[in-house]
């Protein structure tokens, strides 16, 4: 039986506004959120995942940025998975979550009153025992707790990537810093920090921001 996905909006107004046009902007923001989440629901209902979502999807966070004349919104969503999903094999679970690799989950509004674009940046779905996260920033590699799974073109549906802890990421980045800066002699923070973070992001299938945060936090813990 297909579960209906009820959209619950929990985010506040997305932009600051003057008292004169505040109500108009609020209505436009609500229209954008409603239309986009309807698009997400429609896409999910075309696949198997909607059979396993037990609660309404919630908007956990929205980030907006102005690109030219268009305001772009990136949505982070959360939801709960039902017992039927827990009963599936690990391979079956990832086959279903792979839907996020094939669906766009984007919507553009271009009419006389609204000029916005929206996309789903990430979605976090949880069971009582596990948390699954799918992120656009990591090319839809699926994260289950502290493990990462990625689609492969082979007969095997998914290849389990080596579990990586912070110390391994830190050691790799420290080694890159030493090689690129001659052990700190040529260190330029504006250049090398981004370069090393991007190298770690590619190697460990995380974002450059995550790599930089891991490096800094690990350094702090060592002090």
Image (spheres, helix red, strand yellow):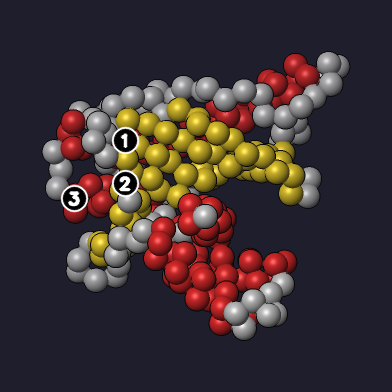
Give residue 141's position: percent from left, percent from top.
38, 57
Q: Residue at x 74, y 24 (%)?
A: 25
Alpha carbon of mark 2 to alpha carbon of mark 1: how far? 10 Å
Alpha carbon of mark 2 to alpha carbon of mark 3: how far? 13 Å
Asked whether 58 or 178 is in front, the reply is 178
Position of the N terminus, as image quadrant, is top left
In the image, is residue 119 above or below residue 38? below
Find disc 1 in the rendering and name its residue.
126
Asked whether 100 or 39 is in front, the reply is 100
Q: Earlier in the sequence, mark 2 or mark 1?
A: 1
Q: Residue at x 37, y 31 (%)?
A: 79
Q: Residue at x 57, y 70 (%)?
A: 196
Q: Is residue 137 in sight in this rendering?
A: no
Badge 3 crowding class, 10 Å Cα cut-off, few under 14, some 14 to 19, many 20 or more, is few
Q: Secondary structure at mark 1?
A: strand
Q: Earlier in the sequence, mark 1 or mark 3?
A: 3
Looking at the image, is mark 2 or mark 3 nearer the viewer? 2
Give residue 149's position: percent from left, percent from top.
31, 58
Q: Is residue 1 in sight in this rendering?
A: yes
In the rendered picture of this protein, how many numbered marks are placed on residues? Answer: 3
Find disc 3 in the rendering and name its residue.
90
Q: Secondary structure at mark 2?
A: loop
Give residue 100's position: percent from left, percent from top.
39, 49
Residue found at the very far front of the displayed protein: 223
Q: Earlier in the sequence, mark 2 or mark 3?
A: 3
Q: Residue at x 18, y 50 (%)?
A: 90
- Left or right of 118? Residue 96 is left
Tag 2–tag 3 contact (CB < 8 Å): no
Looking at the image, is mark 2 or mark 1 nearer the viewer? 2
Find disc 2 in the rendering and name its residue.
145
Give residue 66's position: percent from left, percent from top.
74, 44
């Amino acid at each position: 039986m297909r579960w209906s996905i009820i959209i619950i909006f929990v985010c506040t107004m997305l932009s600051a506004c003057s008292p004169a046009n505040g109500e108009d902007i609020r209505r436009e923001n609500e229209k954008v959120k409603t239309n986009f989440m309807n698009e997400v629901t429609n896409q999910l209902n075309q696949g198997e995942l909607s059979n396993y979502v037990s609660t309404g999807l919630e908007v956990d966070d929205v980030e907006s940025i102005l690109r030219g004349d268009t305001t772009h919104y990136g949505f982070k969503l959360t939801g709960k998975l039902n017992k039927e999903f827990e009963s599936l094999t690990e391979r079956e679970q990832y086959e279903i979550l792979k839907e996020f690799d094939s669906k766009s989950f984007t919507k553009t509004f271009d009419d006389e009153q609204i000029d916005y674009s929206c996309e789903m940046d990430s979605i976090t779905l949880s069971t009582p025992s596990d948390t699954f996260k799918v992120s656009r920033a990591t090319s839809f590699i699926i994260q289950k707790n502290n493990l990462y799974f990625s689609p492969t073109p082979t007969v095997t549906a998914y290849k389990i990537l080596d579990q990586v802890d912070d110390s391994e990421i830190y050691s790799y980045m420290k080694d890159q810093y030493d090689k690129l800066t001659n052990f700190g002699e040529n260190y330029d923070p504006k250049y090398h920090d981004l370069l090393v973070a991007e190298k770690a992001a590619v190697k460990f299938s995380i974002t450059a921001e995550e790599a930089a945060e891991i490096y800094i936090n690990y350094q702090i813990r060592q002090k």
